[in-house]
Structures are given as structure tokens and as C-alpha cells.
Image (spheres, helix red, strand yellow):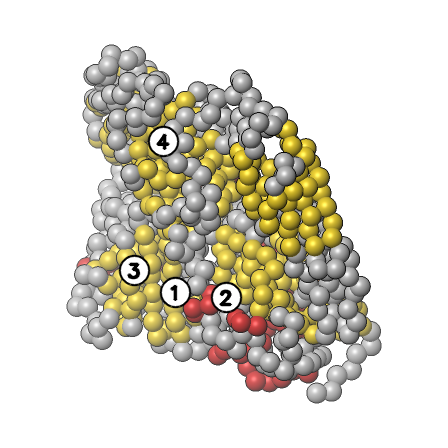
Amino acid sequence: MKKTELTNKTQLGIIIPFKRWLTHILVCVTFLLAPIQSIFTHGTVTNPPSRVWICFQEDPQSPDSPACEASIIGWGTQAFYDWNEVARMDAGGRHREIIADGNLASAGRPDKYGGLDQVRNDWVTTQVTPGPYTVTWTNTAPHQTLYYDVYITKADWTPDQPLTWDSLELLTRTGPRPASATDNIDVVLPQRTGKHVIYSIWQRSLTPEAFYSTSDVDFGTTSLPNQPPVAKFITDNGRCGGPDVTFDASDSSDPNGDTLTYTWDFGDGTTAQGVNVSHTYASLDSATVTLTVSDGEFSSGSVETISLVVDPNCEEIPCPFDTPLQTALPSINASFSNVYVLGGGGPDLSTVTDFTINWDAINNGLYQLSINTNNGIPNWWNNLLESATYTFNAANPEITLTGTGFAGLDGTYAVTIDNGNFVMVSQTEGFTIYFSTSSTAPDCEGVTTPPTNSAPVASFIASALTGTDPFEVSFDASGSTDADGDPLTFNIDYGDGTFGREPISTHTYSAGEYTATLTISDGKGGAATASVSLVVDGDIVVNPPSGDCAFETPLSAPLETIFTSFNNVHVLGTGGPNMESVTKFTVNWDLANNGLYQFSFDLNVAPWYINFSENVQSFNEANPGISITGSGITGLDGDYFAAIDNGNFVLVADGYSIYFSNTETAPICDPKVSTAKDDQISFKMFPNPAVEKISILNQTGLKDNLITISDLTGKKIKSQLVKESTNTVTIDVSGIETGLYLVRILDPSGSSRTLNLLVN
């Protein structure tokens, strides 16, 4: 393969032809755009650079190294343009089960990435030495991390052997980490000579998806001289001190990566061996403890004097519920409407109405950890996953919360499950938080729990439910009651972006549809809600779509849970996409957990598999739908309503429906699925993303169209009825918070179109 090159540059320790500067610019652009391009949900190791990263840097059209050239000749260029998706959607921690020996580099996908599995001695390597080293993952779209695993091939492995699980030894497994575009993992490289492989796994926390990376390194031919190990240890004799002490020397290290032995002298004439040990002292106020670590040639020591006196002012934690556990936390997927703070000094959680946890011990995934409140402080729905670091999959399971917004809640907790209830035991203060389905607090010795509070009952009456713009409505919530006689506070969301706090009020509406919601609270954790729906006529008649091939879309309720694969696809109507390349469609939607875990197409052409589970969708609310972008399938990109018909999955667009089924016979229905003429529903919205204002264009006119902007929960932010004859209308969005919104355009016939809007 002949190439002419004038100048070379070095990047990441690899010689890169200067003529391919454009490739590097495109990579940088990809990184910069990653936060708004959710389809690029991928990454690889860039230090030491992985095989796929090196071949991409060399330019798949004109590679430099023989190994990359052979990979591209045998498997094509696409695998290396897709350098950041050497991944498995179905991993969930089952790496050894789903990836066979010899296919580790390709993530068990040799059809696409088999070039990475080649057994050869000429892969481009990075020079390394034994000792501390940093492995860097570059992630083009950051996601929360469950863990990173970093392996190295064993000392007797050579490049003429295939890469197998038994040929690897684990250097480290990290704990959970927040989303980051770049993640550094510190390891200690052991003594090695010659060429070896560093193999790394990135397991995401919110989905089973995992990414795999293979990097070639060279230790050279000379071993480094042996250096003494470093001894370190920590002690723990409980919150209040005392004679029962545990010792942990796991922070000790060896610069050469040698295996260490650990010897303890407890200072009272007794000794022990091991990394983690415990000891009980008798009749001593203090003790001088010595740890000695040895690599077989050199030894190092660490000495510390510890206090054994019990703090007389310290109180032990009440209701510890046998924490810390000696095992990992079992799986739990539950919601709790009652919370009890046992002991003193705990947070005030009286406004909490619901706590939900979804922990899957088998797949090592914490998929939900959330709190709902009755007053919106700090938010109505609070995602604690963003504030949590945890180790549920090992003995002594714990969680640390930071920045939750709840006063007194931040801190470290031991966790357990008590008769199906979830328990968090503070490790720094004297309280326990008990989440339960029971209205009765747990019986703990020495703990007095407050009496059970009765929730209030909400009454919310509107003077009228329908009317004409301007429509004045009187609301009466004075009939709300509380069995305990507690004073009530009233919060009314009128549904149009305005609020009230009086039990009796009057409000005026413009044309549109609204839901007014009353929330009452007794100040002791009890709350209740009630709602009324209002329709204000502005010469607009709202009718559902016509034609039974629309399958009753848009649905008035959220999409039901479905986890099914379909082998047949039928395009009903006209103007639909060409789906001949689709061999299988799989949808995995879990309404209870609000999770779209898979929305994928298997294809008979490259790229063979595409997944849109992270695309914008509204399956958990009325009018469920999804936006498909970047599919590569002619005519498929666009907005769709979603429905389930006798177990089959349906996507409904303007003019056609896509019907996924396991039968070869298409459904019998009226193929007229359009609810309006093409020119009537052909709207354009710009700019998008928007900062100050948006413009909406329709060539046939916008007179009497109702334009509504809502957030993803369905809450109406702004609405505008177009009263004049015009093809373009401008709406001010400068006062709307940054985020993703839905813009619904409803014409006088009842036909509607929903567009996605990103406000910066």
C-alpha cells in the first residue's frame, strides 16, 4: 500500500501522518458535540491507546501499521470509524458469560470487530514500566459508571497467544462514578518484560451496556530493580471508641507490583497475619500497633498509637438493624410511602411522600433512587442517583449522599433490608432512616417514635369545567379535612404556569386545555392532592385522529410496559419508510421504572444493529411518542405516536403507520392514518436549540392554531392562540428554564403535531 507523506506528527506516543489533520479535528468536534448528541453513547481507552483508537488515528482509508492494515482488509473500515462502540448492550456484568475466549478484543462481536482479535506480534505498543500508571477512558457521551475493571495479561502470556479470560489478572475495580467525559483509573503495573495487553471494561450503571478496550504495551527486556513496599493502615474501634478494634492495611502498596505479606504486632504481646484483622484489648487505655509488610526481599513498617478509651459523651446508634451486613445488599425494587427517622439529630423528612429504590444485585445496577415531596422542596421529584456513591455489591454495603438539597440528609449510611423495608443507618450521627409501607413505626428498644399521622383529605371544586375565552373559574378547596385536626396549607397549580395559596380563589383562563391541581399538607408529612380538568373554547374543536390505522393514537394514557422482539414489519398507508433491511425489532419499555432500556433494529446491512433507547420519548405520559433521528433508514427519521395493538407494537406518523408483529399477515384496517393534509401538518420551527425566541412556520397558515409548550412531565409552560391570518408566529422563550420541551400545534380540525424544543 503506497503512501506519500511530507510531515509526521506524534500524538499519544504514536506517529500520525500530518495529512490526516482533518481526522483529528473531526474527533475533537465529536467530543465537543457529545453533550447534545445522545446517539454517541460510547468510549474507549486513549491512554494507553487501544487498538481500535490507534487504527482510527492512522486513518482507516490508509493505515500505517501492518496490524491495522490487516484488520481493515479483513473486516472493513466501518469498525474503526465506530471506534467508540466496541460494546455489548446485554452485558450487565456478565462479561465472562457472553464473551468467549479469543473474542475479548471484539467484545464478542467478531463479525464487525474481529480484526481486533488477531493474534499477532506487531500491534502498535505503548512503552510502560512497572509501578504507578494511569489508564484513561475518553467517553464521547458521559454516563454514570457502575465500575471500571482494568486487567493485565499474566507474566507468562506472550503475543502469539489468544487473549483469554484465564490469561488476565485484575489490577483494579473502581467504585461507582458520576458521568464524565474523561475518566482516569490509577493502577500499579506489576513486574513484566516484553509485550503485554491492558484490557479494560466500562460497565454503565443505569443500563446493562458495557464497553471494552484492548491496549498493547511494552515493558522492554529489562526488569526494574526491586524497591521496598510502602506500609499503611487504618483502624476503627467504633463511633464511641473502646477495646474492640479492626485494622485495614489495604492501602499498603509495592512500587514493583509484588505480592505482599502482612504481619501485625498489636502492642500487647499478640500478633496476627493478613490484610484485614481485628483484635480485642484488655485493661489498656492505649496501644502502639506495628504493621510490617514484605515483598519477600524488602520489608517496611508503619507504627501508630491508638486510643482504647470509650467516649463517655458518645451515644451508640439506635436501631442499627444488624448493620454492617456481612454480605452484599439483596435486590430490592420497591416504593415506600412512610418514612421514620429513629433516634436524634436526623433530618426532617416530613414532606416526603414517596421513596423509590430499584437495586438489582444480579446485574450490579442501582437503576432508581428517588424521593417525592409534597411541597416541591427542593423539588417535587428528586433523583438521588445524581448525589450518591455506593457499594451495595460487597460486604458492609454503604451509600454516601452529597448535595441532596435535604437539610441533614447528606452523609454516609450503612444499608440493609428489614422485612421488605429499606433501612439507612447513619455512620456519623445517632439516627436511622426507615422507609416502610406500614403506617406503624418499627419497634426499636430505647427509641420513642412519634404517633402515626393521618393524611388529610383534599376537596377541590370548580364553578365550571368548560367555557369560552376569557373563562373565569371559582375554585373552592375549603371542604378539605384532616382527621387529626392539623392546620392545612393550600397550594394550587392552575395549570397555566400560575399558582395560588388560598382555599377559595378565582382565576381567568384563555383558550386551551388545563388541569388545575390542589395540594394540601398538614405539616407533619401528610399530604393529599385533587385535580379538575378544564376546556376553554377559542373556536377550536378538538377531535381525535380519524382512520383505524391510527390505532387510537394519540393515546390518552402512558404506554403500557412491553418487552418483546418482532420479526415482521408492515408499513401501512403511504409515504412510509423502506424497512426491507430490518430483520428484527426489539422494544423494552418499563412503565413502572420509567425506563426505555431497548428500542433497537437488527439489520441485514451495515451497521447491522442500531438502538434508539436514549432518544427523546414521552412513553410515560399521555400522547406517548418518540422521535427517531440518525437512523440511516430511508424515510424512518421523524416523530411518531406509539401504541400497542394485541401485543404488537405500532408507530404512527402523519400518512402512515409502522406495525411490528410476529405474523407475516398485515393487519386489516383503513390505511388512511393521516389526521390532516400533509401541507397542513408540515410545520417548521427555528431556531432549535433556542435562547430568546422561536418561530413556527406553516405554508397554509396558522390562524386559529393553538400552540402549547410543555415540559416532559406534561406541565404546561406557555400557550398561545393565533388569532390573526399569518404563516409565521414568533413566541418568546427567554423566560423558560434551560431544558427539553414539547411544542404541540393544534389546528381547528383537531389535528395536532408535536415538535421537540431545546431551550439553552
Q: Earlier in the sequence, mark 2 or mark 1?
A: 2
Looking at the rendered structure, the kind of residue marked 4 is: Tyr
Q: Where is mark 1, residue-wise?
A: 600
Work out which residue is located at the far right of the displayed protein and give it: 6
Q: CA distance from mark 3 to mark 2?
A: 21 Å
Q: Nearer the viewer, residue 269 or 431?
A: 269
Q: Nearer the viewer, residue 416 or 288?
A: 288
Q: Nearer the viewer, residue 317 or 679?
A: 317
- Helix, strand, or loop for circle 3? strand
**Residue 238 at least partly seen:** yes
* Residue 437 higher or lower than 391, as above or below: above
- Camera-near label (1 vs 3) is 3
Looking at the rendered structure, the kind of residue marked 2 is: Ala
User: Which of the image's four quarters has the C terminus?
Assistant: top right
Q: Earlier in the sequence, mark 4 or mark 1?
A: 4
- Camera-near label (4 vs 1) is 4
Return the x and y of residue 237 as percentages of the image width and height: 55, 33
Q: How many C-alpha atoms fall within 10 Å of the one at disc 2: few (<14), some, or many (≥20)?
A: many
Residue shown at 47%/43% (left/top)?
Answer: 396
User: Which of the image's four quarters has the N terminus?
Assistant: bottom right
Q: Where is mark 3, residue-wise?
A: 563
- Helix, strand, or loop for circle 1? strand
Q: Where is mark 4, residue-wise?
A: 434
Q: Where is mark 2, residue-wise?
A: 87
- Helix, strand, or loop for circle 4? strand
Return the x and y of residue 139 as percentages of the image width and height: 59, 57
Q: CA distance from mark 4 to mark 2?
A: 39 Å
- Helix, strand, or loop for circle 2? strand
Residue shown at 74%/70% (left/top)?
Answer: 219
- Camera-near label (4 vs 2) is 4
Looking at the rendered structure, the kind of residue marked 1 is: Ser
